Structures are given as structure tokens and as C-alpha cells.
Amino acid sequence: MAPLLLFLAVTYLWPFLGVVKWSFTLPEPGLGQYGALITDPLVQSVFIRTLRICIVVTIASVIAAYAITVVWVRGTPAQRMAAEFCILIPFWISVLTRAFGWVALLSNRGLINTWLQGIGFISEPLALVRNEFGVIVGMTHFLVPFAVFPLASAMRNLDDRVLLAARGLGSSRTRTFWTIFVPMTASGIIGAAAIVFVFALGFFVTPAILGGGRSVMVAELVWLRIFQSPDWGLGAAISVVLVLFVGALMAVLFRYVRPRQLI
Amino acid sequence: MPTYRPGPVSLIAATLVALFLLMPLLAVVPVSFTPSRMLAMPSGELSLRHYRALIEDPKWIGGILLSIRIGIVSSVFSTVLALCFSLGVWMFQPRFTALLVGFVLLPMVVPPVVSAITLYFLLTSLSNVIPWLGYDTWLGVAMAHSVMTVPFATVLILVALSQVDRRIDLAARGLGASTWERATQIIIPNIKFGIMTAALLSFVLSWEEIGVTLFITSVDAITLPRLMWMGLRDNIDPAIAAISVILILVTATVLVLRRLRWPGSRAESGNG
């Protein structure tokens, strides 16, 4: 037991405190970097864009995940098997491969533009990637499987007889779904949304590739401040704020949902 | 077995989502056969030149071998650490268990970019003291990957332990087994499968790790994902399509085989 605690204390806790120190001491001691976070228009626009993208991605991922989880949990055995592969194969494939797949589909000389131009539907390629649209599509694709697991656990715990009773009493399929099925899986929806939102906040690879440097998100800004135009203090300060924000979100979440329900 | 089945609307919606999930994976297939040196759809003739580049170009072979080496070292290391920790928690049930476990799980919950800058700080500091474990060394990368994978390994082993019957351990204890004997002869054989899954997941996570790796390598320790990243950022190299197709095929085959061998097993190992 002790070796792991010691290992993480040395390799994680100590350097994190070092990063916190950076945020207060680079380039000069004081709260200057945190002041910059509030006043710098570039940093602000990045924060606002990150929040906007995260909210859109969360909504899109949870809806998409809900649709496929219904079939994964409640379909016929063949349907369940098909849904399971569609969820798990992307889940196990690296984020780079998946981002690259979207580049191959969406770029100017990619599948969609080549095809649309081929049938004469458009003359100029559509700008589908290297902008916010591409980032949202790629992130949603990455996060759908993560939203599936909490939703699936909520749907498995739902008592079938309630649904059958509603149908037996003459409720339509649509009405049963919206007034019984969805409200009874609300805990799964909240859990899924929270997981997706927290993951999306710290996202780095997909925005960097599909955003093409034009729609920079918070995590990419940290990278830029460390390696491209060095301002380690600012990068460190953003990281500290990010941790505090995620911590606060989780604290709020755990007041409503028990951690067990998320897996 | 639920008897309430999804209706036609649900099935259509799910099919659309399934298409969305599979589309980018299918899109890389035609690109990988393009004869062009740039990213483009093949028009007319097909070519295997990008697959040949993977075999002939030493940088791809080097990246693959390095990723395998880092994956094995970090997977063994993080599985051993996770096993010791979990056994300690399970056998001695110390006070503040929840707090200790929470601490261990931190690298899993904290946004990856924060872990990345943290490990960047660690390795650049280490560079001055122990050069072979510092920034841009393969051992440094393996250590950083261990930090990132150890929470997942711990979760899997703790889950496996939670299913062990405590009475077996009590019986062994009553018969005079030492702590070491209890751990190695009673408990570990009972969670073999969980330990193997933990090692496998650690390896896979290290194999495809990119967020942290980007921060802690520059020219020497170029893993496969790092190589793919470079090819994606600058001029998009269709060799990435070829390696992607291979990775997708391997993943799909493993999942299908696993499903055929253990038809009952769910995605329990997948969500960590």
C-alpha cells in the first residue's frame, strides 16, 4: 500500500504543488497571472469558447448516447450485439485515429466534399473542419461512449413492469417514452452529462487537430503557453483554475448522485 | 431479459448514431489506399505505398517498438503498485480508506492537461538530478504513463477484490497463514483475472497515450501516437491512414474474439 502512495506523492502531488508555485512566481512573484486571467481578452475569449463548445458537446453526446443505449440495453439479442460493437469499437480506438478519421471525412479534399462536388451539389468545398464545427463533431464522437455507461446502468435498473403497465393502460409508445422512461432514467442523464462535461473541459487532442489552431480551447492554450510562446506562469495559473473548477463541479455533482451510479 | 423492446423510432435514431460512430473509422480505409502523397480520396487506381512505408520507414518501426517497450514497462510497474495498494487496503482496512483511494484516483479525474503540465514539471526537474529518467527519455515517459494508468489498474483490482469471499481469508488466517502467505496463496489466485485485465488496460492506455506524452517528449522519445500527431499536425501524411486501418482492424478483431469466447461478459472492463 505504501509504495503507491509514496510513488504518487513524489510523482504527482509534489510536482502539482510545483505547478501551483509557478502560477504565483513566474514571471514575478504575486497574483499577476490570476489578474491576467480576468483581464486578458484572449484568455477570456478562450474560456468562453471552451464553455460554449463543452455545453453543445454535452447536449449532443448525451442525446446520441441515449438513442443508442436504449437499443443496447433493451433491444433483441442481435440488436444489442450490434449496438455493443458500435459503442465499444470506437471506445477502444485511440483518440488520434478517430480525429484523423474526421479529417479524412470533413477536410476540403475529404470524403464528404469530394462526393458533394462529384454529384455537382456544391462547387467550392464546404469548410467543415479547422473550425468550431469540426471540433464539436470530433469531441461528440469521442465522448458518446463515455456517456453510454451511466445511461446503461440507469436503464438496466429500471423496472420493466412499469413500462408494460403504461402500455397496457393505453399510453402510446411516444408518450410512455417521454413521460415514464426518460424521467425514470434522469439520474443516468445527469451522470452522463457531468462526465462528458468534465472530460470535454480538459480536452486537448481533438480540438488541436480538428480546430486547426483557429478555435483554441483551454487545454490547448496551456500547451501554447508552455511550448509556443512561453509564459509558464499563465499556463500554470490556467491549470490551477481548471482543477478548482472541475473540483467544484464534482463536489456539486456528488451531492446529488452517488459515485457508484456513474459506472 | 427485458420484454419491453424499443420501437421503430428508437431503432432509426440508434442506427443514425451507430453510423455516426462508425463513419470516421470507415473513412480512413479508402484514404489509406490513395496513390497520392497527400491526403486525398483515391481516384481510379489504388496503391499500397503507404502500407509499405510503414514497414520500410525506420521511424514508424522505431515508434511502434518504443511504444511497446514503454507500454510493457509502465503496465508491469503500475499493476504491481496497484496490486500492493489494493491488497493493503483490502487486508488491513486502514482508517481513511476512502481518502487514500480518492488520492490514488486523482490522475484519472484531474483534467489530462493539468496532469500533463504536472508531469512536465516533474520530468524537467528530474532531468537535472537523474538524466536517464528525465524529460524526453523513454524511462521518464514510462514513469509518467504509470502515473496516468495506475488509477485505472487500482479500480479494476479493487473491483475484483470486492468479489472475494472474506471468509476464505479468515480461514487461512485462522489456520496460521502469515500475511505474505495469505496474499500470495489465497487472495492473488482469486483475483488473477482482475490483475490480468488491469495489466492489459494499463498497456492499452499507455500504447495510445498522447496528451501527457506531448508535454514530456521532444526529439528522442517519439512514441507511435507522438509520431501520428506530428504527421497530423503539419502536412497530413496518408501513412497515418494505413496505421489507423491496422489499429482499427486489431481492435475490432480483439473485441469480436472476446465476445465469442465470453459471450456473457459485458463491457465491465471498459469503463474503468
Image (cartoon, helix red, strand yellow):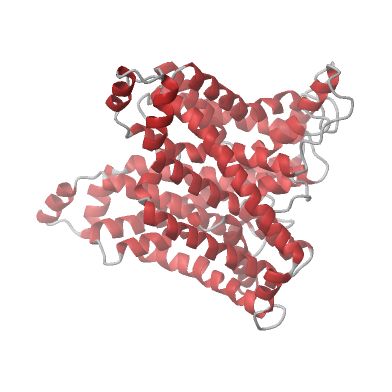
Which residue is located at x 72 percent, y 65 percent?
A: A226
Task: Judge from the rendering whether residue B94 lies leftward or rightward of residue B57; answer left or right.
Answer: left
The outermost residue toward the bottom is: A29
Q: Residue furthest left?
A: B174
Looking at the image, which is closer to me, A226 or A164?
Answer: A164
Quadrant location of the C terminus of chain A in the rendered image: top left
Q: Residue furthest right?
A: A123
- Residue A3, compared with residue B83, is above or below; it is below
Residue A232, placed above or below residue A61: below
**Whether residue A11 can be seen here:** yes
Residue at the image position 29 percent from the left and 48 percent from the top: B161
**Residue A216 position within the rendered picture, expressed as x and y whole percent measured from the top left:** 73, 53
Left or right of A137? Residue B99 is left
Classify residue B63 by image quadrant.
top right
Image quarter of the N terminus of chain A:
bottom left
Q: In front here: A231 or A238?
A: A238
Q: In the rendered image, which quarter is residue A175 located in?
A: top left
Rendering coords of residue A44 (x, y %): 71, 62
Seen in the picture, residue B184 relative to B116 is either above or below; the reply is above
Question: Can see residue B133?
Answer: no
- Closer-to-camera residue (B28/B75): B28
